[in-house]
Image (cartoon, coloured by chain):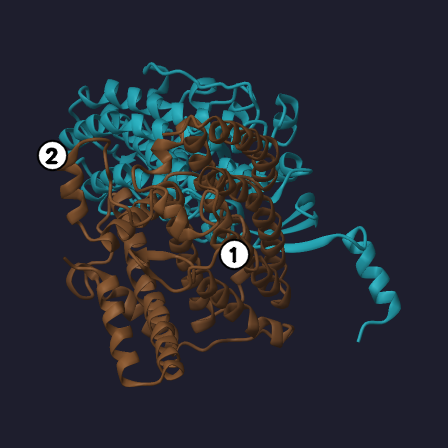
Amino acid sequence: MFSLQGITNGIEKWLHNNMSANMALLVECAIVIFLAISLFAILGLILVLMERKVAAHMQIRLGPNRVGPFGMLQTTADTLKLLLKEGLTPDGADKFLFNLAPFVIMIVAMLILAPIAFATGFQIWDLNIGVLYVTAISSISVIAILMAGWASNNKYSMLGAMRSGAQIVSYELSAGLSIISIVVLTGSLQISEIIESQRNGWWLFKGHIPAVIAFVIFIIAVTAETNRAPFDLAEAESELTAGFHTEYSGMRFALFFLAEYINIFIVCAIGATLFLGGWMPLHIGSWQGFNHIMDFIPSSVWFFGKTFLLIFLIMWFRWTFPRLRVDQLLSLEWKYLLPISMFNLLLMTVVAIMGWHF
Amino acid sequence: MYTETEIIKDNIKAGSETDLIINIGPQHPATHGVLHLIVTLDGETIKKIEPHLGYIHRSIEKMCESLSYRQFIYVTSRMDYLSSHINNYACAMCVEKGLQVEIPRRAQFIRVLMSELTRIASHELWWGAMAMDLGAFTPFFYAFRERETINDIMEETCGARLTMNYMVPGGVMYDIHPNFQKRVKDFIQLFKSKIHEYDELVTGNIIFQNRMKGVGYISEEDAISYGCTGPVARGSGVHCDIRKLYPYELYNEVEFDEILETGGDSFARYLVRVKEMHQSIRIIEQLIDNIPEGDFQAKTKAVLKLPKGEFYTRAETARGELGVYIVSEGGATPYRIKFRSPGFSNLSALEHMAKGSKIGDLMATMGTLDLVIPDIDR
């Protein structure tokens, strides 16, 4: 059976047989960096194309279909175009911060990738505070957005950045609380243990109503955290032209664009890990035959399938809903989502203590 | 280098030191054209809006003075390009009033049909563009699906899709295409089978309703004093449909309702336009099967000369009341022409509506005003 763990174990064995332990570690690091960067590139290509195709089919169009079969090379062509474009820096801009911001946002996106388990035993860094690490690192991305908005010396950019700051800081609370409600059930912050605890069923199904509420709040909160419609106030092109990245062009703009999609992938991967069992196959109680067939599907397929399902959900939101207003956005969080998720956390604690979950 | 007095002067101009002045337009996705709004903000709250006009001023009124009574009508297609039929219609009626020509009944039927089709097409485009102002892209494509059918009908009969130039003094330029009736009926069927999607996608959406309700409020008195007409005034409960108040040609023979909403907010204006599309369909349904045989154009002289005097007609475009005022000295060209365009007066109420609200509300308000910038600047 196809397994990513088999490949990694094979490579590790071969490296250790042929070189010293330190050298092998160095080579492994190099391989991981290479893989992470190529994953970014591939995800960028796939997600941008996916977004355009999903959008097109929701809007009774066909989407890109000229460059390559089914328009598959469209994103490559667009990237090439952006690479060849001039990256302008406005005169009044704070040049250092202006040029730094796109890299900060990319580095943050890369760092969150570390604890994500892509398949059985296929994980860069299984640290024992994995979930905490993810929430901590993802809040740094707001600094990059504020940096970009402030340094651009553009009023639209600044308004967008300020909106984004208020938005991300507030929605992190409910995202964090809904993550904690799963941590309450598993009793561990380690990603691999959270996945292991879902061997006999996903938390979305096992955790009763509190888990479902937490899942819904999580999806809403991460949509807001990644600045996607209906919460795309930081970009809000009909109000602020392009929000915080109005002044960016060329490849620096592309980095912001790419970081948005990478962030969507990451939050969806976290969502799939916490609520949908990560790489765990779908098992239904005592249906031995069904469970056995499900086990045959490689774990990486399960992981990516669940993640892309959530990504599709977030894209669906974008192409259906109008945008919220800035005060409505904040009142939704502080008046509704936060109290509900706090109460939900209490409920989840009761469920966990009483052992009412499956 | 700024001197101290200059800084003080600028601060006085800005109102206070904490104000943020932002230029919305002339190049901005939400202004749908070259409208320039200088908005004074306090954080996100709007303190002052100052529209700057004239970016697409072509002095159409002055141009018309050097064109003959047949020619000047074509220029008016470029004013409110989304209801170009109705612009032409109003101008043709004004010339006919001066010439005292009797219009053949067939021509009247065709004119009213075309006007109502134009109104639907215009409201469809507005519906899509307004949803886009609020950040929803998909409605735009839904609206264009139906609007394309109307454009095809126009293309077949008038030869153009946007600036049709079909109405001439004395009737219409040429007879309708043999397919016209069938295609209009097909369109009505398509429209009726798809219109529920509009409500499902936008009208019933909770985010949309929260964005629209209570936003951009204007009372009935204020709407009258700002000179608002069309759906903007009718959203505040002003009885102002020219087709009902001063019915021209066939409008007193067909049955339709004047849509009045009393909300006065953006949502009321939205509902007025959506319901108006249904009324236009109603008018078309009454007329499409009964187009009488006969001439499509009255016999007129090759060179039209209006008698000395002043002539004024008005028509209800998709945006409101369009007034055409011609002063004639008896020559082959008008001595003076003035258009009373609905967009200009509706825009003047924008500051009153949006003051004190957020930037997002400004877009929602501007969207429901349905501004067409060439109509404002002319």
Measured Cα–Cα span from mark 1 to mark 2: 71 Å
SS for dot 2? loop
Residue B187: name its quadrant.
top left
Name the quarter where the C terminus of chain A is drawn.
Answer: top left
| 1 or 2: mark nearer the eye | 1
Q: Measured from the top left, where is residue B376 in percent x and y? A: 53, 45
SS for dot 1? helix
Label 1 is found on which chain of the structure?
A: A
Of B31 and A310, the residue lying toward us: A310
Q: Amino acid at mark 1?
A: Tyr
Of A242 and A312, the residue lying toward us: A312
Residue A5 lies left or right of residue A237; in this view the side is left
Label 2 is found on which chain of the structure?
A: B
Q: Colour of chain B?
A: cyan
Residue A133 image label: 1
- Res. B110 visible in picture: yes
Q: Amino acid at mark 2?
A: Pro
In this view, A223 is above or below A39: above
The residue located at (24%, 20%) in the rendering is B285
Of A114 and B269, the residue lying toward us: A114
Residue B225 lies left or right of residue A122; in this view the side is right
Q: Colour of chain A?
A: brown
Crowd around label 1: few <14 · some 14–19 · many ≥20 (10 Å): some
The residue located at (18%, 46%) in the rendering is A295
Of A122 and B56, the residue lying toward us: A122
Q: Measured from the top left, where is residue A75 in percent x and y? A: 29, 65
- Residue behind mark 2: B178
Residue B142 lies left or right of residue A347; in this view the side is left
